[in-house]
């Protein structure tokens, strides 16, 4: 599992295997808009303030992936111990 810190909500949530960042954040009571939940629509795009992202979406360009400052939280995860998101 990895830890996600929400800079706007002031919450920290653990994301366990089999649970998406989106689901973990919602379970903590934060409202997040989503649509496809498959990494193809872009609705859940979230700004990443810190941490390494493991991208699993099908929308971001290589340059956007390399920049590492946005992620689709319905499918993408952390490759570091934690992420800080602007949520
Ligand atoms: Fe569609 Fe995340 S909800 S990309």
Image (cartoon, helix red, strand yellow):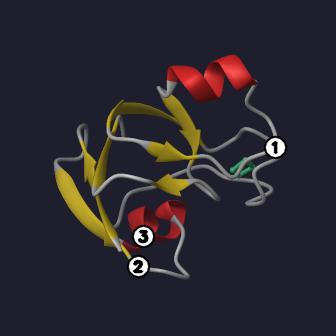
* Crowd tier of the residue under label 1, counting other residues whose Cα lies within 10 Å: few below 14, some 14–19, many 20 or above: few
Apparent side of residue 27 relative to residue 66 in the rendered image (left or right): left
Which residue does the image show at 32% across and 66% down from the upper left?
2
Which residue does the image show at 62% across and 46% down from the upper left?
55
Apparent side of residue 9 relative to residue 72 in the rendered image (left or right): left
Which residue does the image show at 53% across and 30% down from the upper left?
70
Badge 2 vs badge 3, beta-carbon distance below 8 Å = yes
Q: Which mark is residue 58?
A: 1
Judging by the rendered image, the residue that carries numbered circle 2 is 16
Name which of mark 2 and mark 3 comes first in the sequence: 2
Q: Position of residue 39 (x, y in %)?
A: 75, 51
Secondary structure beneath dot 3 equals: helix
Secondary structure beneath dot 1 equals: loop
Quadrant of the rendering where the N terminus is positioned:
bottom left
- Residue 27 against residue 32 in the figure, above or below: below
Judging by the rendered image, the residue that carries numbered circle 3 is 24
Q: Position of residue 59 (x, y in %)?
A: 79, 35
Q: Position of residue 56 (x, y in %)?
A: 69, 52
Please name which of the two marks, 2 or 3, marks the residue nearer to the observer: 2
Name which of mark 1 and mark 3 comes first in the sequence: 3
């Amino acid at each position: 599992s990895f830890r996600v810190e929400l800079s706007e909500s002031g919450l920290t949530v653990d994301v366990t295997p089999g649970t998406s960042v989106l689901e973990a954040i919602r379970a903590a009571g934060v409202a997040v808009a989503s649509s496809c939940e498959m990494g193809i629509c872009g609705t859940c795009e979230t700004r990443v303030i810190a941490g390494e992202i493991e991208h699993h979406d099908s929308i971001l360009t290589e340059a956007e992936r390399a920049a590492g400052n946005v992620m689709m939280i319905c499918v993408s995860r952390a490759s570091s111990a934690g992420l800080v998101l602007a949520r």
